[in-house]
Image (tube, helix red, strand yellow):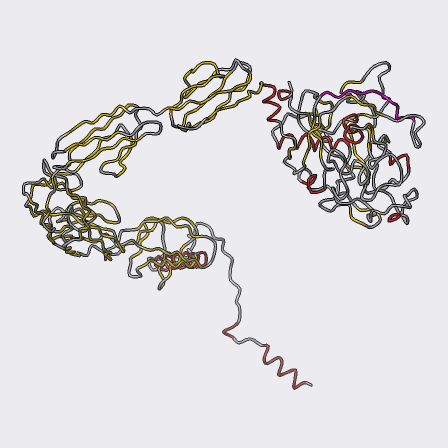
Amino acid sequence: MSSNLEDHNKFDRPKAEDRISPIEFQPNVNRPRKTLYQFSWVHLPIAAFVLISGLAGWFVITAKSVLIEPVPITSQVSFRNGFGLKLGARYLMRTGSYSIEITNPGYKDYQHDITVGIESSQVFNFILTKLPGDISIEANVPGSRIKVDDIDVGLTPLRLDIEAGLRTITVDKDRYQTEEFELNVEGLRNTQVVSVELEPDWADVYVDSQPQGAGILVDGILRGVTPLDIELLRGDRAVMVKLDGFKAWKDELEIKAGANFKIPLIVLEKSDGIVFVQSDPPGASITVDRSFVGLTPIELSLAPDQTHTVTFFRNGYESSTQTIRTEPNQSFEIFAALTPITSKVLILADPPDAEVYVDNKYRGPANQEIELMAATQEIEIRKKGFIPFKSDFTSRPGLNQEIRVTLLSEREAKLALIEPKIKSFSGAELTLLYPTEFTMGASRREAGRRPNETLREVNLNRPFYIGVNEITNAQFKKFNPDHSSGTTNGMSLSNQMQPVVRVTWEQAALFCNWLSDQDELPKFYLTETGEVGEKVIGFDLNAHGYRLPSEAEWAFSARKTDNGLLKYSWGADLPPLPQSGNFADISVQNFLGDILFNYNDNYIHTSPVGTFSPNHYGLYDLAGNAAEWVHDFYGAVGNIGGIDENPFGPDSGQYHTIRGSSWAHGAVTELRLSFRDFGDEPRDDVGFRIARFLEEDLVQ
């Protein structure tokens, strides 16, 4: 224990030289302070190095790696403003805008502004443009025209700068063949020499004639006189050799460049004699030496030193012959007064006081015997208020001939122009009827009569056309392609030749207006267009465009005969005759109640129009198949104590009248032609047919 303590004390006891001795304190008054740091010039480069190193480090950290790739790669890049540190193929550049310049011998200097973005690595590509090439062009023919890429640059010999690349060189000179070739211009201020050999574009042609001294014209230009060796340019050339007193020699020569040749000796023929031939009357046929040459007046070229026979011919005149001897290059005249050949023709005309004209010349009253030439002439018979008669007539000498004419008054002529049948744009055929006075309705004693079938006298005095058939689905779809007549009992009603059904009265009327437009007729129905479309608001009785038949017209067409009025379409009694129409019969007994048990038409719905027998006017399906909308509003009918003239029904109403029976009718009431129905909605057994007035100017 004591030993350890001693050891401890031995180590803790300081040595004499390490002892701290106390000294007297003296305050620091007026004693200079010693400087802790002393500046030395040695420190300046160190500071600069530290600063530059810091800036370089900052630049390296913030700069972007930029690759500037010029083509060609040997180009030199310099900065016009800004700074870029080149490291190998790349530059260290801070973000911002720089102006650079790229140069290379043989290329145009290139200056461009670039913008270094924030991306760490960026590439800029540049292509330098070669300087033009120094091109010399020479030709074997001085003054040849040079074009480079179709641009005229001057005449040979020529030295010029041409932009580097493949260029089309054209060398052209009058009377030489054009040379065109491609030249690859090297550029870079390199010199290239081009030599061009132009080939002649003509041939030497020798021309001689007998006799000599004849003028030579090439394409109408005088080139000299024979004999002559001339240069003719390549191509087709019109060559003429002419000499006074001789016929001109002409030919088309195909000239090939460099192909010289000699035209065989040209022997010129003496000129024809010129003969001017006239006759009275003119228009006579002329033959020379029995060959036809034309009609008088005419100028002829005849062979010289010969005698020619000239003969005149004209219908209705005696022929005349003359002879003439011609001399070269001399003119002559021949004239012949032809003698007419006549015969007598009797003109008989009605009315008796008509007048006759021959070739538009007045020849007196029509009823006489006149003398006509034995030729074709225009005969016209006229009288005021009548349509003139015109015809070509040829009188024959030695024959007894007469012309009989009955002139038509203007009204008769108009009626003769009226067509009994017409066809509309839709293909619907209409027939013309001339109506008369008749009785509509039915007697109260008639079985099946309804109260709305009042007897009334009607006078129709305006001829009208009415449809031979009901309008078909195919015809209606030309107006409304989207329409469908639907089905009934699972069977289609929309086949092409079935009557269109499930149409409203207004749709039928608008179809009529559309059809009038197609045939360029004035519209019958007045319409206006609103939010719900086009609507009928009235009609124009003076228009002769297409329309629905009036109820009176329908009744006349269905019932009026020379022997009275029909009760049924087939006659006066039931049952219907075979092929009378498409009615409700035993073929539909599983679908309908009132049917004809002793009749079978083999159709359970609408049949193709025109399937059954027509009526006395040639009209089909006025009874059966589809009932029909007519023009009239439905309402009370009759004119107490008078006759209805051309009635078109009430002025307004909710419903429109429907006439005729349909495939769904088999009872006595509906089968009668006087049956009247009405409606305002489309039905699967109601269609329509069209009508129109005959134009007023044809009947007045």
- Magenta portion: prevailing SS class: loop
Pick whichever, 640 or 341, lies toward us. Answer: 341
Residue 527 visible (yes or no):
no
- Which residue is depicted at the point 89% across and 48% down? 586
Q: Is residue 395 above or below residue 9?
A: above
| Relative horizontal placement of residue 569, taking residue 162 as reference (left or right) | right
| Relative horizontal placement of residue 608, taking residue 213 as reference (left or right) | right
Pick whichever, 318 or 274, lies toward us. Answer: 318
Residue 201 visible (yes or no):
yes
- Write down the quadrant of residue 59 in the picture: bottom left
Where in the figure is residue 47, as x and y percent of width and height?
A: 38, 57
Q: Is residue 280 above or below residue 303?
A: above
The C terminus appears in which quarter of the rendering? Answer: top right
Pick whichever, 296 or 379, lies toward us. Answer: 379
- Which residue is depicted at the point 61% across and 21% down? 412
Where in the figure is residue 245, as x and y percent of width and height?
A: 10, 36
The verdict on residue 208 being magenta is no
Q: How many marks?
A: 0
Q: Is residue 282 above or below residue 22?
A: above
| Relative horizontal placement of residue 77, taking residue 14 as reference (left or right) | left
Question: Which range is magenta?
Answer: 451-461
- Which residue is depicted at the point 64% across and 35% down? 423
The N terminus appears in which quarter of the rendering? Answer: bottom right
| Relative horizontal placement of residue 200, taking residue 479 as reference (left or right) | left
